[in-house]
Amino acid sequence: MQSLSKTNLADTAAEAIRAEILGSRWAVGDKLPNEATLSVMLSVSRGTVREAVRVLVSQGILETRQGSGTYVLSAADTTRPLTMARRAGLRDQFEARLALDAEAARLAALRRTPAVIAGLRARLAERGNYEGGDKAAFIARDLAFHQAVIAASQNAVLAGMYDFFSALISETIEASLRADLPEPDMAAHAAIVDAIESGDPDAADAAVRRFMAPVLSALDRLLLS
């Protein structure tokens, strides 16, 4: 195992440990060396090793057992889907988001209730329009609206996928705030809610596609320029 540089040490240490697990140095069920040994192997502090282990525990790769040690829980590379998505072009990210949003809107239209529609309109009112200022806060409000549409689908797998890729979806929202990409306005968002409220899944699907079309067209123009 190679020693690490001082940049992002905990993340790099976690990657090094994960690589050893994927490389079969430690199999599922094996106990990892103690902190002191890993610290020497990686040439980092024991605190950095502790943080790296916490990262891998949160990802389901390792588990800690009180009074026993740290064990390999899974050898699956749980970060690969997100890593691959991050490497995809921005247009690919928007297309993937469109697929999730459109299907969620279709299901939401079929499963709508007055309470759900009221909740969507409340999230939309909270979103508002971006008029400069705190960009991160606006992105969070916009994401909350779209997550509410996903939740309205009542599909746990769709909701889980959306949550898993929430960082990437936030990146697409941020990209639409740039000068070279059009930000879907409140009317475009409201049209999605109206279509869901109509109970027509085709209308809901079409509303999402109209919502996303200007952004995809702008990206196509940028790719050709």
Image: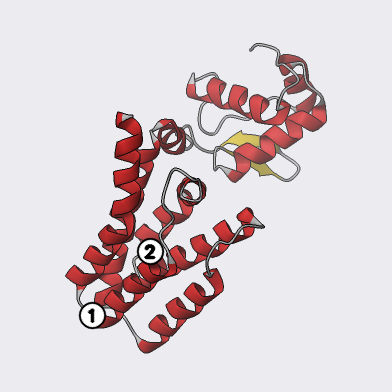
- Give me the disc on residue 199: 1
Residue at x-position 31% and y-position 78%:
194
Position of residue 168 measured from the top left corner of the image (x, y, whole percent): 47, 45
Residue farthest to the top, as pictured: 2
SS under mark 2: helix
CB within 8 Å, label 1 to label 2 = no
Q: Is residue 21 visible?
A: yes
Q: Residues within 10 Å of mark 1 (few under 14, many from 20)?
A: some
**166 lies above or below 159:** above
Nearer-N-terminus badge (1/2): 2
Position of residue 34 measured from the top left corner of the image (x, y, whole percent): 74, 27
**64 left or right, relative to 192:** right
Q: Nearer the viewer, mark 1 or mark 2?
A: 1
Q: Residues within 10 Å of mark 2 (few under 14, many from 20)?
A: few
The quadrant holding residue 131 is bottom right
Colour setup of the view: secondary structure
Position of residue 59 measured from the top left corner of the image (x, y, whole percent): 56, 42
Real-space CA distance between mark 1 and mark 2, rounded to the nearest whole angstrom? 20 Å
**114 left or right, relative to 201:** right
Position of residue 214 measured from the top left corner of the image (x, y, whole percent): 32, 52
SS under mark 1: loop
**88 left or right, relative to 203:** right
**80 lies above or below 7:** below
Rendered-image quadrant of the N terminus: top right
| Type of amino acid under label 2 | Ala
